[in-house]
């Protein structure tokens, strides 16, 4: 096999497995004696894990303070949390929660040792100052299986509204020192949230696999993650522990891969959609994935029929169908059919459920050409992106089915 040059960026130390949450106090003690803990609104703190964690921290002589992150973090929130605790001089940050918590914790860990605002460094809307660090040691403990933020170097921050944005504070210094993934923490995750988060993870795996920057190493990881997802996703939604382990593993692989390869059209559109409308990120990914895949396949077939991405899409179709003998054209169709079936089975809402209408399509398309869109397998034309969005509006809002 011919191998082109490639690079793999920094990754955390990864601790994966059921029950590993018990190791968190000892891991924290490696980095200091004053820990700032960021969690979600309530669920982890109301579980038995919280009491055991705080007891373990005390046993290791670790003082701690606590912040709750109850929505997608904004630049103002990151700056405010940092300001509240800078004088206390934390020595490490623990992020325990979904992607919003981990992104907030990552940003705070980067800001606490320096005297800057996150807006000094935020891509696209910030002041363009280089971030030089050092960041505080950060330990990431995901309690959902979706964003893969535990394995990435970017903290995604949002401002919602007509002039909103969704941008990254990004640097190698922000990568977690330790990513502790315990599938048991998913047991309390509501099925609806697990479904949306899981679709985000699968979207990241698929988009990484067909990305223009993919390489043999990320292909192997993405493929492994998609296999685990195929075998575990619907079992996890039904409450199966082995299924939860598989989707936790798949989510981790999705984070590792996206950090190396970039993503594609779904995430390119997810950025303005999440900024302009109150639509959860996992829902955006889940509701767009089938039609984005269909439109990418059609565009590749028409304009780049020799693209390796077409063969990769066909391979995914065979994987999800569990039939390696499908002919490529059949496999491509089966892939789109499977993803549309998942969209229906999961009852993923259409975009107008969050206030978007056909009149908003040009604005969303115009703001979709960020970094994720740059690694889509080919450049989609504005009318193709508009068609994608229109397919995920209900007829009453000016949409049409694919």
Image: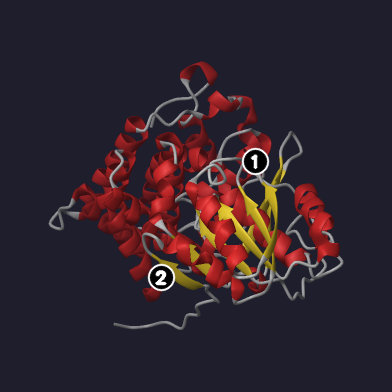
Q: Which residue lies most toward the left here?
A: 325
Q: In this view, does 384 lie to the left or right of 174?
A: left
- 93 or 297: which is nearer to us? 93
Image location of residue 325, percent across then percent down: 12, 57
Specify the quadrant of the image occupied by residue 169.
Answer: bottom right
Q: Is residue 155 left or right of residue 49?
A: right
- 258 or 19: which is nearer to us? 19
How many numbered callouts?
2
Residue ID for mark 1 = 70
Q: Which residue lies most toward the top here?
A: 396
Image location of residue 219, percent across then percent down: 36, 68
For label 2, the crowd category at 10 Å Cα-Cα, with few meaning under 14, some 14 to 19 and many 20 or more, is many
Q: In the rendered view, would you say 400 is above or below 208?
A: above
- 1 or 161: which is nearer to us? 161
Residue ID for mark 2 = 218
Image location of residue 386, percent across then percent down: 54, 36
Q: In the rendered view, would you say 259 is above or below 318?
A: below
The residue that appears at 44% across and 41% down in the rendered structure is 189
Picture quarter with the C terminus: top left
Picture quarter with the N terminus: bottom left
Q: Is residue 255 visible?
A: yes
């Amino acid at each position: 096999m011919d191998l082109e040059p490639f690079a793999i960026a920094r990754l955390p130390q990864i601790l994966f497995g059921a029950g590993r949450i018990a190791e968190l106090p000892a891991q924290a003690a490696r980095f200091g004696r004053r820990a700032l803990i960021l969690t979600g609104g309530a669920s982890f703190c109301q579980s038995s894990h919280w009491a055991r964690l705080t007891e373990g921290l005390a046993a290791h002589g670790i003082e701690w303070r606590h912040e709750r992150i109850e929505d997608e973090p904004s630049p103002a929130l990151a700056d405010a949390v940092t300001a509240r605790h800078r004088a206390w001089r934390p020595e490490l940050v623990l992020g325990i929660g979904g992607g919003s918590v981990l992104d907030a914790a990552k940003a705070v860990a980067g800001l606490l040792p320096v005297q800057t605002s996150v807006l000094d460094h935020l891509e696209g809307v910030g002041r363009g100052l280089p971030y030089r660090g050092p960041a505080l040691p950060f330990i990431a403990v995901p309690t959902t299986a979706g964003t893969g933020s535990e394995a990435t170097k970017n903290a995604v921050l949002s401002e919602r509204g007509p002039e909103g944005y969704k941008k990254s504070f990004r640097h190698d210094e922000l990568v977690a020192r330790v990513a502790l993934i315990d599938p048991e923490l998913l047991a309390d995750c509501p099925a609806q949230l697990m479904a949306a988060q899981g679709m985000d993870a699968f979207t990241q795996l698929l988009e990484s696999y067909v990305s223009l920057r993919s390489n043999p190493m990320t292909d192997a990881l993405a493929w492994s993650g998609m296999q685990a997802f195929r075998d575990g996703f619907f079992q996890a939604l039904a409450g199966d522990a082995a299924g939860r382990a598989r989707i936790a593993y798949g989510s981790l692989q999705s984070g590792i891969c996206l950090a190396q390869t970039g993503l594609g059209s779904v995430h390119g559109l997810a950025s303005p959609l999440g900024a302009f409308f109150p639509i959860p990120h996992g829902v955006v990914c889940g509701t767009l994935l089938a039609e984005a895949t269909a439109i990418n396949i059609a565009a590749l077939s028409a304009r780049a029929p020799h693209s390796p991405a077409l063969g990769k899409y066909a391979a995914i179709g065979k994987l999800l169908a569990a039939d390696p003998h499908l002919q490529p054209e059949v496999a491509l169709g089966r892939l789109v059919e499977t993803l549309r079936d998942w969209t229906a089975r999961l009852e993923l809402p259409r975009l107008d459920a969050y206030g978007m209408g056909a009149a908003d399509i040009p604005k969303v398309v115009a703001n979709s050409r960020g970094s994720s869109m740059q690694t889509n397998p080919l450049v989609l034309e504005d009318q193709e992106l508009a068609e994608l969005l229109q397919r995920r509006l209900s007829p009453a809002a000016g949409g049409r089915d694919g």
